[in-house]
Amino acid sequence: MHRVSIVIPVYQGARTLPTLVEEIAPLTHQQTTPNGKGFVVCEVLFVHDCGPDRSDTTIEDICAKYLCAKSVWLSRNYGQHAATLAGMASATGDWVVTMDEDGQQNPADIGSMLDYALDSSLQLVYAQPTNPPPHGWLRNGLSRAAKTISTKMLGNSAIGRFNSFRLVDGEIARTLAAYCGNGVYLDVGLFWVTGRIGHCPVRLRDELTRPSGYSYFRLFGHFWNLILTTGTRPLRLITIMGFFSMILAIVISAYALYGKVFGQVPVQGWASMLIVVSFFSGSILTALGVIAEYLAVTMGIVMGKPLYVVSTKPTRPAVLP
């Protein structure tokens, strides 16, 4: 019987949480996955992230009515990822599910995600929506572009298809919550300590009674945080640009000298100016790139990127479906 903890960060959930917890309630009794594996939702952790509505009283009412419901109170608004990590730190289940408060994600899909993890020996399973998110075309397009960029930055196609609906090995979730520092993007932190990642097809639903609480400005902040914590790949791009700039300066210099000596072509003042600017700008970019590499290593240490994570069970290779 696999015990599952559900972590729900709450920002504006006064109207949506009662409906969501009613859908979760049947899962708190022994269930079987589509493939016949036993599981039960042992606890539902509501992490109050100090939103503008009265989600606090809603959480208190839910905790008084349902034995499985637990509250985690934050001192101020820290954001979705920080709230999710706070819930992970308090979770006790063999598996931890993270999901949103707005009702897009169906708790009934947890059984399928658990099957996917157990059958393929995975540590982390993301929900893979089979339908477009219920947002406008602009937001959906920007979301796809951001995930594509992050995939290139991380160099791993699996982590690029992240989603807030996740199933994480309980030990991984609690270990990550214990060391993950301020400013670390949650999915990047998961990428640091997981090697077997899968994606389970699910269908998204419309949000229950309110639109998303994330403005374009806040979404850009999440994207920028993702870029800053992906590692040294973005910084290496600066070094590469510097090398190409230096090569361009050498090519222009050779062309100008050849034209002056063999072609009787007068070399005007702009040529020497361009050569000097190209060469030294390339040198500066290269130097900045090298320095940035060292700063990136230091940043990784300060953030708490682990050298290794100890597990109580052996790491088995993934079983391809």
Image: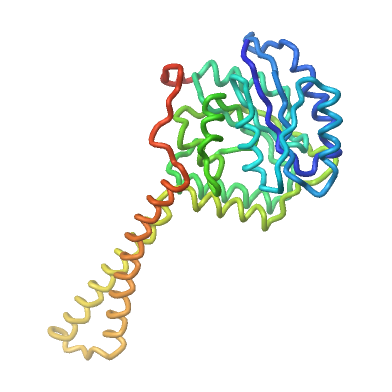
Q: Residue 270's x, y, as percent?
A: 31, 87
Above or below, 167 relative to 47: above
Left of 24 or right of it: where is 61? right
Q: Quadrant of residue 235?
A: bottom left
Q: Nearer the viewer, residue 198 or 257?
A: 198
In-image side of 219 versus 48 (left or right): left
Residue at the far left in the pictured view: 262
Quadrant in the rendering for residue 263: bottom left
User: Residue 46 sits in which quadrant?
Assistant: top right
From the viewer's perspective, is residue 310 above or below residue 242? above
- Residue, x 57% and y 20% (percent of image)? 116
Rendering coords of residue 287 (x, y %): 31, 65
The residue nearer to you, when weighing 284 against 51, is 51
Quarter of the image for the N terminus: give it.
Answer: top right
Q: Is residue 53 left or right of residue 236?
A: right
Decide which of 271, 285 is in the foreground and name it: 285
In the image, 48: left or right of 183? right
Name of the residue lying farthest toward the front: 75
- Give the number of callouts: 0
Rendered position, 98 above or below 287:
above
Query: Residue 120 location in percent, x, y?
Result: 50, 19
Task: Indicate the position of residue 289 as horizontal and vertical percent values.
Answer: 35, 61
Give me the residue at 86% from left, 37% from top: 57
Q: Residue at x 86, y 23 (%)?
A: 65
Residue at the (25%, 76%) spot, across then down: 252
Q: How is the image coloured?
A: rainbow
